[in-house]
Amino acid sequence: MRVPRDLSGQELIRHLAKLGYGVTRQTGSHVRLTSLEVGEHHVTVPNHDPLRIGTLAAILSGIAAHRSVSRDELLERLLG
């Protein structure tokens, strides 16, 4: 599955809530999310519209590595 090119930071935050990520804090336009499932994991999402493709790909790759799944499988869970 291709990485979406029109996803905003707020939309990504809503989708990550499905995986158990919750907002921990916000500094300026950057929101830090934390998940306690499968161990503690933190990820920072810029609250931009749209997210840059490289930024989104890096965020998704980090989450996929933490959960030991492929990025495509993670995209299917989030957006599929």
Image (cartoon, rainbow, N blue to C red):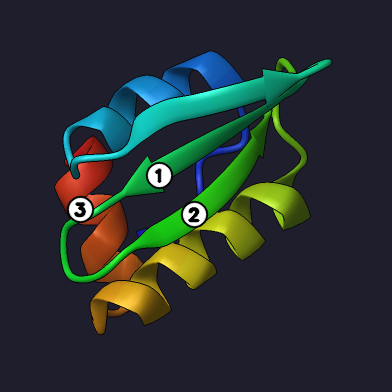
Task: Inspect the image, locate mark 2, and give the three-letter code of the amino acid beneath it.
Answer: His
Residue 58, image x and y in percent? Answer: 64, 63
Report whether residue 3 is seen: yes
Check disc 2: other Cα within 10 Å, few if <14, some if 14-19, many if 20+.
some
36 relative position to 30: left or right: left
Asked which secondary structure carries label 3, the reply is helix
Asked which secondary structure carries label 2, the reply is strand
7 relative position to 52: left or right: left
CA gap between label 3 and label 1 equals 21 Å
Task: Pick whichever, 47 or 76, lies toward us.
Answer: 47
Q: Nearer the viewer, mark 3 or mark 1?
A: 1
Task: Inspect the image, locate mark 1, and give the three-letter code of the amino acid beneath it.
Answer: Thr
Label 3 vs 2, first from the N-terminus: 2
- Residue 78 is drawn in which quadrant? top left
Q: Nearer the viewer, mark 3 or mark 2?
A: 2
CA gap between label 3 and label 2 equals 21 Å
- Give me the disc on residue 34: 1
Q: Quadrant of the C terminus?
A: top left
Residue topped by disc 3 = 76
54 relative position to 21: left or right: right
Give the residue drawn at x 27%, y 61%: 74
Task: Inspect the image, locate mark 3, and give the three-letter code of the amino acid beneath it.
Answer: Glu
Task: Pick whichever, 20 or 69, lies toward us.
Answer: 20
Give the residue drawn at x 17%, y 34%: 18
Q: Quadrant of the N terminus?
A: bottom left
Residue topped by disc 2 = 42
